Image (cartoon, rainbow, N blue to C red):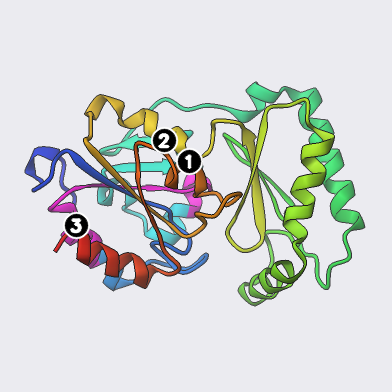
């Protein structure tokens, strides 16, 4: 994808289109297709584009390629807590500074005990992933294979394991202003309330966009796209696959 550095070159310079990554731009934990790449190249001639991922920036490099800072006008990792505009890093925030080590240790200990007591067909490794702006909790462990990831997703959908886990954490840590957001296939995010994907919108204020589109697949209440999808300043588009994303884009930007 070729870089474009000036918003004034776009047909609609006051319009930005933001995308979730997993299930929206790429299949879950998979690489972006050539067809989607070309769709974004064409879209970037018409509007400003960016992605908003819950994972850290390394995961977005894995799925979207090594040139993401050139391919997207805005790159928002960890919901925008790590942010880039035209390849330049913007201000960031830290979860550990917000929560403090004492409460963080209690959260980790409770989580590991809960996972230890879960009766799952398989458990792998990396049950808690520490990120700059949040933690990601996975009952099966993020080291599972793609096949095991798909198996757990089906197992979880039938039993609501992640939802029950979230309810237990909400009860135990009701004194903390935390949000628990289920996303992807195997995990959920934990972060301070207000640090969901709407956090990235504060980075757009200086550019004064008149229209902000957002595409995401976890747009249901409790999903990690819900808050930005339903935000009053955002035009939300709910998709199930990257093919849905491309179809809607062709309708919106013919």
Q: Nearer the viewer, residue 244 or 150?
A: 244
Q: Nearer the viewer, residue 208 or 5?
A: 208
SS of the residue under disc 1? helix
Q: Indicate yes or no whether the magenta region holds residue 51.
A: yes
**Circle 3 is placed at which residue position?**
43
Give the percent coordinates (x, y) of residue 138. Answer: 71, 55
The quarter of the picture where the N terminus appears is bottom left
Give the percent coordinates (x, y) of residue 173. Answer: 80, 32
Residue range in magenta is 38-59
Gap between marks 3 and 1, in whole Å?
22 Å
> Residue 200: which disc?
2
> Residue 197: which disc?
1
**166 with respect to 9 (left or right):** right
Q: First in sequence: mark 3 or mark 1? A: 3
SS of the residue under disc 2? helix
Q: Nearer the viewer, residue 177 or 6?
A: 177
Residue found at x 31% / y 41%: 74
Give the percent coordinates (x, y) of residue 69. Answer: 31, 45
Residue found at x 21% / y 59%: 252
Label 1 neighbourhood size at 10 Å, few (<14), some (14-19), many (20+)?
many
| Whether residue 227 is visible | yes
**27 with respect to 186 (left or right):** left
Q: Are marks 1 and 2 in contact (CB under 8 Å)?
A: yes
**150 with respect to 210 (left or right):** right
Gap between marks 2 and 3, in whole Å?
20 Å
């Amino acid at each position: 994808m070729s870089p474009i550095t000036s918003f004034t070159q776009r047909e609609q310079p006051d319009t930005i289109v933001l995308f979730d990554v997993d299930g929206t731009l790429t299949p879950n934990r998979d690489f972006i297709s050539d067809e989607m790449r070309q769709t974004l190249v064409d879209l970037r001639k018409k509007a400003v584009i960016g992605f908003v991922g819950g994972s850290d920036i390394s995961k977005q490099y894995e799925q979207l390629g090594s040139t993401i800072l050139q391919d997207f006008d805005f790159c928002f990792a960890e919901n925008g807590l790590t942010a880039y505009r035209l390849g330049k890093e913007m201000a960031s925030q830290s979860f550990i500074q917000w929560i403090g080590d004492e409460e963080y240790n209690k959260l980790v200990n409770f989580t590991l005990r809960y996972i230890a007591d879960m009766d799952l067909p398989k458990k792998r490794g990396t049950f808690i992933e520490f990120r700059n702006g949040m933690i990601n909790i996975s009952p099966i462990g993020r080291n599972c294979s793609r096949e095991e990831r798909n198996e757990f997703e089906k197992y979880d959908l039938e039993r609501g394991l992640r939802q029950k886990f979230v309810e237990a954490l909400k009860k135990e840590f009701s004194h903390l202003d935390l949000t628990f957001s289920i996303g992807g296939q195997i995990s959920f995010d934990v972060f301070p309330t207000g640090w969901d994907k709407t956090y990235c919108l504060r980075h757009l204020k200086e550019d004064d966009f008149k229209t902000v589109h957002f595409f995401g697949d976890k747009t249901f209440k409790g999903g990690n796209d819900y808050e930005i999808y339903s935000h009053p300043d955002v035009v939300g588009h709910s998709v199930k696959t990257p093919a849905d994303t491309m179809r809607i884009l062709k309708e919106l930007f013919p």
